[in-house]
Image (tube, grey):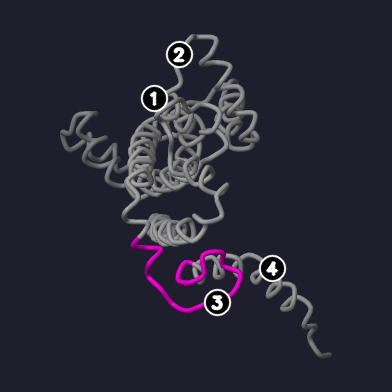
Amino acid sequence: MKPSRMPLLITATVLLFFYVPIALLVLHSFNESRYSTTWQGFTWKWYETLFQRADLWRALRHSLGIAFLASLISMILGTSAAFALHQYRSRWQSAHRMLLALPLVMPEVLIGMSLLSFFVALRIPLSMMTVTIAHITFCFGYVALVVQGRLQDFDFSVIDAARDLGATRLQANLRVMLPLLAPGIIAGGLLAFTLSIDDFVVTFFVSGAGADTLPLKINSMMRHSKELPVIHALSTLLLLATFILVAISQRLIHRKTR
């Protein structure tokens, strides 16, 4: 019986649907045409224009600073939450897991609106601090899930062996457990960094004056057609950086599962 080609056709169609728009975006970042309707020749000028835009680089610095701080705090909170859920058993742990996973499945619009209401109720002015808090809210759950997967296969007998050899509890945790968990923690942190740096919906609700991140800046630039090629160039660089971070994260995840 001849095998059906339908699964291959469906797979090829889905891949084309996902990746052809990305390929066109990269292609138009080198297009001489300002409006990207026709190909008018190869050029680097949009990248040159991009590197001259001080407002874009300021927004990028804001995004990088927020993403770095949010991922760092998410690694600490996520690792602590994963360890607590794995180590301690009680009737409340199901509720704890649900609360941990809730920001992962809740629509970003609801997260943004609820955080905005929270900050307004506490009379906290919207700033980069509120954006950072909002990003930590939905990022640390991803770190916790990644670290939980590592803890499920973790051999805690090595901690007991270290204690038997004279190590204190702190020394055993810092010199034995932490290095073994490091690939999972770093992978979760890189995932949190990627989610934070390109978030738009939540940031839109909780950002204030002077706290524009790169996604917000790109959104405002989209209203002007003459700036589309610069957006294509910027998106290409962000795409490249995202692929590198995801590749590093996946490599660390595969390493920890060996």
Residue closer to the observer: 145 or 10: 10
Magenta-span inclusion, residue 38: yes
Residue marked by disc 4: 14
Percent across and percent down for residue 112 are: 58, 28
Q: CA distance from mark 3 to mark 1?
A: 43 Å
Magenta-span inclusion, residue 62: no
Q: In the drawing, does residue 182 fall left or right of residue 167?
A: right
Residue marked by disc 3: 39
Name the amino acid, label 1: Met
Q: In the drawing, does residue 224 fall left or right of residue 82?
A: right
Residue closer to the observer: 208 or 241: 208
Residue marked by disc 2: 124
Residue at horizontal 33 percent and vertical 41 percent from the top: 58
Residue at horizontal 38 percent and vertical 67 percent from the top: 45
Nearest to N terminus: mark 2 or mark 3: 3
SS class of the residue under badge 3? loop
